[in-house]
Amino acid sequence: MENMKTNQEKITSQDINSVSKRWILASQITWNYEKMMAIGYLYSILPVLRKLYKKEEELKAAMKNHVQFFNTTPHMGGFILGIDIATEAEGKNSSKDGVETANGIKTGLMGPFAGVGDTIFGVLIPTICGSIAAYMGQQGNVTGVVIWILVNIAIMAFRYLTVGIGYREGTKLIASAKDKLDALTSAATLLGITVVGALIPTVVRANITATFTTGEVTLAGQDILDQIMPSLVPVLIVAAIYVLLGKKKMTSTKAILIVMGASIIFAAIGFLG
Amino acid sequence: MGIQVWQIMVLTFLAFFFICEGLSTSIFANQPVIIGTITGIVMGDIGTGLAVGATLQLMILGVGTYGGASIPDYVTGAMIGTVFAITSGKGMEFGMGLAVPVGLLMVQLDVLARFSNVFFSKRVEAAIERMDFKGMARNTWLGAFSWGLSRAIPVFLMLIFGQNLVNAITEYMPEWLMSGLSVAGGLLPAVGIAILLRYLPVKNYIAYLLIGFIAAAYLKVPMVGVAIMGVALAIIAFKQEVAKNQNVVVVNQGAVQEGLLDGEYED
């Protein structure tokens, strides 16, 4: 005879670790235009679902529920999985409808988490690590590449912990972290912009080969410009592309093609070299 | 210098591996500078791989791939560019000239991979109906083939058939085009920087852009030094902002209490 108590399955740390591993490996592997990360989400949470929902129709309903559209930053999805698991386990034990709440949490959190996550993991870390690795790389030094790989290993270790953090801290995490997340994002942005400022004079190479002749004196264009401001031409080129990108219908790909075309023309007329 | 059969096999396998790795554990993370370096190691010329990868990396700073948008695949571009920069003996600029068009062509295959996975997605849904857990897992993992083959097949074909084409190009490439590509190699990083500046809230942080510029252009501080200085500035700003937020909370609570008191008086 089935006892009410049998429903009260406890989520163990093995379950959480299994979800973490699955999410890291499979979150995007079946990414598609229809459901985006939904298949990865279902695959990740499946061990927990099978534990929570013992009746076949319950389990099927839960699986169908989790195969709905989902998309966020892969690095942040672990938090959402953890919070989701906590909510559904809680709902199961108190015979409330945890599924409904969990759905609200999933759809409510994937946007904001993607906002913070894309900024930090999608833009700022690649900017900072990429700038250093590429700058060193242009000088033939692999140290920057090695540093970046080490940073990525650290990020993966962090991702492994996120499901557990989300599970333990549950929804209160969002409220408590909100202020600090904003401060963290703006501090990281500031760091990124400082590095970009240094990047302009160090990696953009534009050597003016044109010379100006007045009477008997020949002046090298580059020397004149250097006296006004170091790296004046790189600054102007970045500014010009920045303005160009603000134009409607301008894409980064078009900008790249324009720069390549302009480089060939300027080199051919002997202005740059 | 030609390409060996084992190098073609290893690079084809790596093309499959890199895209799947970038989507999961993300240690090599589909970043041109890392992929270029590894390709350089396979080809026995790490310096050229590093140079091609670094220039591509700077070109695409700030071009994120999140949210499901396809962007030019400069990772595959970095592989192909590195290989032919080395085998043609024409160096980094020649590799860049190939990497950009390859990256632009590859974007179509990225779209194809994302479409193909709809098929496996449907099969997972069918497996749910049957309560077939093995089928769900299998079809989830089969998605790796959409991604992997979308990179491995073109890389394989380009490495097999590209050599003759590249030989023809190098033979007939005019001098003005080579020097143009060389100039482009120097200027393209400006595109990446400009894209990034468009994305970041530069207007609010213009002071930090100037600080970074002055440190590098006038004071000649190396990049790592600038990054450390940036960390110092970030720590200061973080502490100030957290403190400010706490003050705002306190002030708000004060205002709410006052409001209540006013209300009581009116009653």
Image (tube, coloured by chain):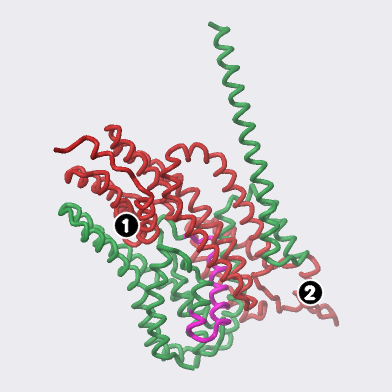
Chain colours: A red, B green
Q: Residue at x 51, y 81 (%)?
A: B40
Question: Of B24 and A270, which appears nearest the observer?
Answer: B24
Q: Quadrant of residue A144?
A: bottom right
Q: Residue at x 35, y 71 (%)?
A: B148
Q: Residue at x 52, y 37 (%)?
A: A176
Residue A193 on image: x %, y %: 63, 56
Asked if residue A236 shows in the view, the reply is no
The mark found on residue A223 in the picture is: 2
Give me the C-alpha separation between circle 2 and circle 1. Answer: 54 Å
Residue receiving disc 1: A33
Q: Main secondary structure of the magenta part?
A: helix
Tell me which amino acid carries mark 1.
Tyr
Chain letter belonging to callout 2 = A
**Is residue B204 shown left or right of residue A120?**
right
Q: Which region of the structure is painted magenta? A: B39-64
Q: Residue furthest top?
A: B267
Residue A214 on image: x %, y %: 82, 77
Q: Residue furthest right?
A: A216
Q: Earlier in the sequence, mark 2 or mark 1?
A: 1
Residue B192 on image: x %, y %: 56, 64
On whether disc 2 and disc 1 are found on a single subunit, the reply is: yes
Callout 1: SS? loop
